Image (cartoon, rainbow, N blue to C red):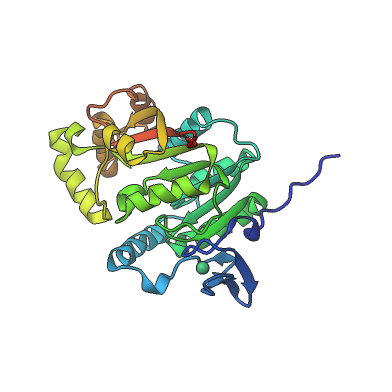
Amino acid sequence: MVRKKAKMQMADYLCCPECKSGLLACEGGFRCKKCSKRYEVIEGIPILVDLGNLTPYLQFQVRYFEEKTRATDAIFELAPWQKNYVKKFVSNAGAIKDALVIDCGTGSGYMALELAKRDARVIACDLTLKSLIQLKRTVEERGQSDNILLVCCTAESLPFKGGIADYFISNAVLEHLPKDKEAISEMGRVTGSSAIAMVAVPFSYRYIHPLLLPINLFHDWRIGHLRRYDEKKVAEDFRGWTIKKTFFTGHTAKAMKALTNMVAKAFDEDGIEAEDENKHAVRWGAHNMISFLAKKPKRFKR
Ligand SMILES: [Zn+2]
């Protein structure tokens, strides 16, 4: 007889984002056992961050992504680049069946939905409550509520118990964070000793074609990117991790063709993606960098 898998329970994974102590269920939400801070649950989503007390920069980020949520309907079909991100994770991370994946900064949630479909247990978190509420609808429509848990929080102060995650995804998140080092340290805290992380970041300006530099600078300013990364910076920032593999994506030809397609649909999107995929070892012209990192074993003092 096939036993139905148990639904993911918030109490098994969540803790106070401030003091990392356990939470007690109380009316309308949770209360921290230690510091007594209260956290609301809105539309079934625990709000483990003080949304009323965000810095002006984070408020701007939430507003920007709220606008984006309004513009996009619930996802039904993945864009070619999204399919490619899912494929990269599935073929480079390891076995995900029954594993716990934290998709930090889940956004539209395409990665969380795809991995849950492949029987992973997924915690999908984001700071934009509005996109989480929309994602929750999609999760329910698809009958995936048992293995996706949605949480509203910041990446710099995660409300998850230590060592719980087998995999951690940080997809286009670090460049948005004023305190990216704290987010990296939190990533280390919530992951288990043999965890694998997938980290996607915008690639350093010095590899970008000079003609595309102005539009990149404008895009970074508009969306609020605080910095870009290269392999050296990722290696330095992720001191507790070893880089296993890095892919370079979004090369000049893809950017040019995507820009042309915005004006007139001239190029087939699957074709653009396949062409770009062939260059994933080429740094020059790439706009993004995707790294797979393995946690370093802890050294014990004798
Ligand atoms: Zn607390």
Q: Quadrant of residue 1?
A: top right
Q: Position of residue 56 (x, y in %)?
A: 28, 68
Q: Is residue 75 visible?
A: yes
Q: Quadrant of residue 64?
A: bottom left
Residue under the image location 23 percent in, 55 percent down:
222
Q: Position of residue 141 (x, y in %)?
A: 62, 55
Q: Quadrant of residue 243?
A: top left
Residue 184 position (above or below residue 81): below
Tell me how many marks there are.
0
> Farthest bottom residue?
27
Residue 284 position (above or below residue 46): above
Q: Is residue 166 left or right of residue 285?
A: right
Residue under the image location 28 percent in, 43 percent down:
262
> Farthest right residue?
1
In front here: 36 or 1?
Answer: 36
Q: Is residue 265 visible?
A: no
Q: Is residue 76 left or right of residue 143?
A: left
Q: Is residue 266 left or right of residue 27?
A: left
Q: Position of residue 194 (x, y in %)?
A: 54, 35
Residue under the image location 44 percent in, 53 percent down:
107
In front here: 295 or 228?
Answer: 295
In front here: 250 or 180?
Answer: 180
> Farthest front residue?
302
Residue 271 position (above or below residue 288): above
Q: Position of residue 231 (x, y in %)?
A: 29, 32
Residue 254 position (above or below residue 2): above
